Amino acid sequence: MTKKLNFHFICKELDEQLKTRVDFLVKVSLVKNRKKFIEDYISQNFSKFMGEDRLLTSEEVMNMLQISRQTLGRRVKSGVLNPVNPDAKRNYRFMKSDVINYIQRKELEND
């Protein structure tokens, strides 16, 4: 069991002032360097940002495939494209990776 030692540099009041001042300086440093911290974080985790498998809306998929809403509905009904929420009639959500795989399969068929 460890005991916490309570000691003060000069006096309790001055010690509290020092703690407050250090906290303030740390916050100022974080604010000043936030842009660098964010850039460093993104550079270290770039693959996570780019590899994210997010959900695409029907509009986004229609724009990617350059098809109409009716064609999208037919492809969902035939099972070519599988939405995450198949019960929704018009506001489908699709996994980005599924749509990209569909595009790649379609390109292979055309070659």
Image (tube, rainbow, N blue to C red):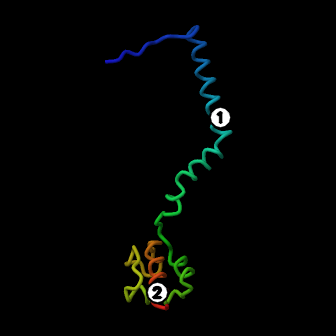
Q: Residue at x 64, y 43 (%)?
A: 34
Residue drawn at x 47%, y 77% is 99
Based on the displayed image, in which of its 4 quarters is residue 67 positioned? bottom right
Q: Which residue is drawn at 58% across and 21% down?
A: 19
- Considering only vertical position in the picture, is 110 above or below 92? below
In terms of secondary structure, where does tag 2 sit? helix
Picture coordinates of residue 18 (x, y %)?
Answer: 61, 18
Crowding near the residue tagged with mark 2, few <14, some 14–19, many ≥20 C-alpha atoms within 10 Å: few
Which mark, residue 9?
A: none
- The x and y percentages for residue 111 are 49, 90
Q: Farthest residue in the front direction?
A: 111
Mark 1 neighbour class, 10 Å CA radius: few under 14, some 14 to 19, many 20 or more: few
Question: Residue drawn at (38%, 78%), measured in percent from left and top?
Answer: 86
* Image coords of residue 106 (percent x, y): 47, 86
Instruction: Tell me how far mark 1 sits from mark 2, CA to CA.
Output: 53 Å
Q: Is mark 1 on a helix, strand or loop?
A: helix
Question: Which residue is most to the left?
Answer: 1
10, 69: nearer the viewer: 10
Q: Which mark is residue 29?
A: 1
* Side of 60 where 98 appears, left or right: left
The x and y percentages for residue 41 are: 56, 49
Q: Which of 17 and 48 is in front in this view?
A: 48
Is 35 positioned to the left or the right of 71 in the image?
right
The amino acid at mark 2 is Leu
Q: Do the residues labelled 1 and 2 touch (CB within 8 Å)?
A: no
What is the three-letter code of the residue carrying label 1?
A: Ser
Q: Is residue 85 above or below residue 31?
A: below
Q: Which of marks 1 and 2 is nearer the N terminus?
A: 1
* Number of marks drawn: 2
User: Which quadrant of the view contains residue 76?
Assistant: bottom left
Task: Point out the frontmost of discs 1 and 2.
Answer: 2
For disc 2, the marked residue is 108
